[in-house]
Amino acid sequence: MSIAPTLLSVEGLSKSYGGVHAVRGVSFSLKSGEILALIGPNGAGKSTCFDMLNGQNVPDTGRINLLGEDTAGKKPRAVWRLGVGRTFQITATFPTMTVRQNVQVALVSYGRQLFNLWASTPKYAQEEAGRLLELVGMGGYAERPCGELAYGDLKRLELAIALANQPKLLLMDEPTAGMAPRERIELMRLTAQIAREKSIGVLFTEHDMDVVFEHADRILVLNRGTLIAEGSPQEVRRNPQVRAIYLGEGLLYDASHHDGAPA
Amino acid sequence: MAFYFVQFLTGLASAASLFLVASGLSIIFGVTRIVNFAHGAFYMLGAYVAFTLTERFSGAIGFWGGIVAAALIVAVIGVLVEMVLLRRIYHAPELFQLLATFGLTLMVEDLVVLIWGPSDLLGRRAPGFKGAVDFFGQNIPSYDLFLIALGPLVLGLLWLLFQRTRWGVLVRAATQDRDMVAALGVNQKWLFTSVFAVGVFLAALGGALQIPRDAVHHAMDLRIIVDVFVVVVIGGLGSIIGAFVAAVLVSELNAFGILVFPKISIILVFLVMAAVLIVRPWGLFGKAEAPARRTPGLTVNPWRPLTSNERLAAIAALLLAAALPLISGNYALTVGSEIAIFVIFAASLHFLMSVGGLASFGHAAYFGLGAYGVAFLAKMAGLPMIPSLLLGPLLGLAGAAIFGFFAVQLSGVYFAMLTLAFAQIVWSVAFQWVSVTGGDNGILGVWPEPWAASPSHFYWLSLGIAALSVAALRVIVFSPFGFALRATRDSPLRGEAIGIDGKRIQWTAFVIAGTVAGIAGALFAYLKGSVFPDNLGISLSVDALVMVLLGGVETVSGAIVGAVVYKALNIWLVSQTDLSKLVLGSFIVLIVVAFPKGIVGILETLRHRRRSDAPKPAVLGIESAE
């Protein structure tokens, strides 16, 4: 892991709204092929952090170095061009197109054909789109109208769209929110597998601690805008400060240490 | 100096009525989310009813009582309209609401002429405010001073109403989140009705108060509604203080604009509006609009290119249309040419609306610019027909490039209002700049060359260009650009996240649509042999909207069917009745209420229903945003 190049390094990221510090001095880094979870209670600043990385929000101060470029304040589409795929907490897809066309649009954009007025999109990169859909297990749904999909399938479609520009980094905001428990585990297993195969770095936020502890290589814990802990799942689980924050929620119950009472 | 001060006061006095109407529109929009196009019609009705009442009852009590009674009577009419019509379409897409209220406006215009006659009516002077005040040798009508005082007074009363009464609290709450207010057990129906009544009352009062200053006539509705749209775009929809500030600003710009650019004073207002939109896209006091909601229950079948059979059928239909000169006379061919031209026009708007999700309420501007482009080239530069036809639409392109740049910064109702205001500005320039455009007299003698002059030749020319335009637009719909445009419409968030610059895509689409509309306009100039300001007027813009909606927005080819049906019906209707606006308005309202999917949309639904072997489970609309 140590040989892997650093994809993303964040230094002193801050953002405040009025007098409220949503994010304060957050620094971390992420390597190729690494799966990093960003957790914290509601209002901890996870989404603000995410939106700044993605370019949807401009940080007050701090540096975001993505693949050697300073991306703080750049537009989402510019960040995407650098090789960042993004999925949203509430899925964002194109409901009036078929599943395959959803992926094809992303491929059209990746191929810089957006202002082509002549070619036929339904025929554009059909196989490539099919391959991406196979990869996320949606091959059988390619010709279905996207608006008819169940929510879990939309999440998988989003993953296929996010993979269309052969990203080096995936930003996934609550990738399993709103899914059934079995679907959650499947989707994260799939994501982890793809990430390892293609050595894509993954940064995700998540409320489901089972998903976090099972799949994350490393965990960042955010509380009230500041980073209070960072480390492997075991380290974070034992961290007294983290326990204090989650006290009473029972979320850090550790099945492997059955003798110890939940914090 | 005194002169400028008086000019300033005149501006302030004009601002009073404008503020009343604009605040009414803002309040109604805030709660019901309906942009009430008929607001101008209520303003006009207020003026007419007040005219009748003040003529009937003399004296100070008769006059002032008449003004207030007129506003109340019109408010009652407004309540009836709300209960009968609007309650049915609160959940329809915004576009349909705008269109339904526009249909209402058309109906009122004809009804007003039917009741009060077509000529201008001069109202009484206000008792107690008949004189003028001398100010360093300049006269200031004392009624103007009354209006200047009235504006802030109404603003204060509205503030008290909204801050100090239970009803006001409910209205403010509903403006922020009407579903939450409904969940708290407030009777939403009556809240909406009462808000509508107050808004209409303000509009009618604004109209009634105008009668001592201006003649009452049956076109005052469109004149005020454009000013009001400009005011709410500058001030921000839903903000009353914004309406006040912007009304003063716009009125002052009008008052002084006449001194600076006597011919094209409206340019000044446009420049200020453009500046405001760049700095604050939602107006000086407005807030960003929530994303437009999708029509519930309207499942969209993804579009597909024509199959080879369907392509053959299209070619057969074209050949059939091309055979028309063999069987019919010259009149039918002229009508046929006009229909072909309107197919081009409707298809261009349909492209913008269905693929781009951008409902332009001023698309005629680019049609008219194309027509004027041809007229300039043919009459002034003396170019032959083919170069004129090719270059004339470039004026439409230029107009679309300039206005489109600003328009695509906004979306939904703001986009609609802005495009309407732009079109009206172009119309005013064509109307006022007599030395170049000939003003109301238009430019005459734009005749086709001999090879195209016979009705059958011109028909074939129009049909050919229509077929090419429609085919070109279809190719674009299925091109990568077309998909990028649809992607931006479907989910701007996702589009941006996969590298699509939505604004640039939409701007390009606007320019394409404007250019194609310009082509239609260029042909139209040769068909009619003349160009008039009406060629870029509001009613033409609305004709195009109705054609698109009649055919069905969520279809690829609806515009063609819509244009053929509507234009044929329209030409027939105008030859049959003097009340074409009344019939047309009722027709529009009927379409919106009864057939929101349009003709082709209904056919497709039926075909789809028959085709699908097993009934599918009800599809839940999955929203990409809350």
Image (cartoon, rainbow, N blue to C red):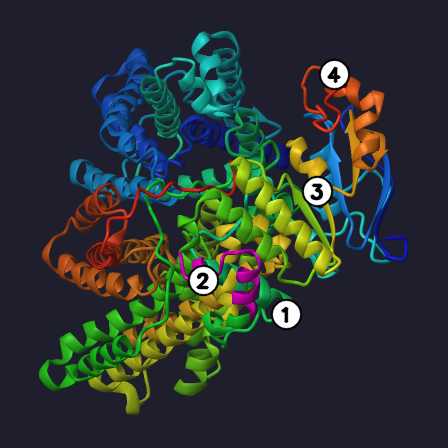
Say which residue label 1 marks.
A112
**Real-space CA distance between mark 4 and mark 3, rounded to the nearest whole angstrom:** 24 Å
Label 4 secondary element: loop
Q: Residue type at mark 3?
A: His
Pinpoint residue B282: horizontal percent, then vertical percent.
58, 39
Circles 2 and 4 on the same chain: no
Q: Is residue B407 visible?
A: no
- In the image, which is nearer the foreground, mark 2 or mark 1? 1
**Real-space CA distance between mark 2 and mark 4, rounded to the nearest whole angstrom:** 89 Å
**Real-space CA distance between mark 4 and mark 1, rounded to the nearest whole angstrom:** 56 Å
- In the image, which is nearer the foreground, mark 3 or mark 2? 3
Label 3 chain ID: A
Label 2 chain ID: B
Along the line of sight, the residue nearer the viewer: B506 or B53: B506
Determine crowd level at label 3: few under 14, some 14-19, many 20+ residues with C-alpha closer than 10 A. some
Q: Which mark is residue B434?
A: 2
Say which residue label 3 marks.
A215
Circles 4 and 1 on the same chain: yes
What range is drawn magenta here?
A: A128-144
* Quarter occupied by residue A131: bottom right
**Real-space CA distance between mark 2 and mark 1, rounded to the nearest whole angstrom:** 47 Å
Q: Which mark is residue B78?
A: none
**Real-space CA distance between mark 3 and mark 2, rounded to the nearest whole angstrom:** 74 Å
Tell whether A81 sits left or right of A103: right
Mark 4 vs 3: CB contact within 8 A: no
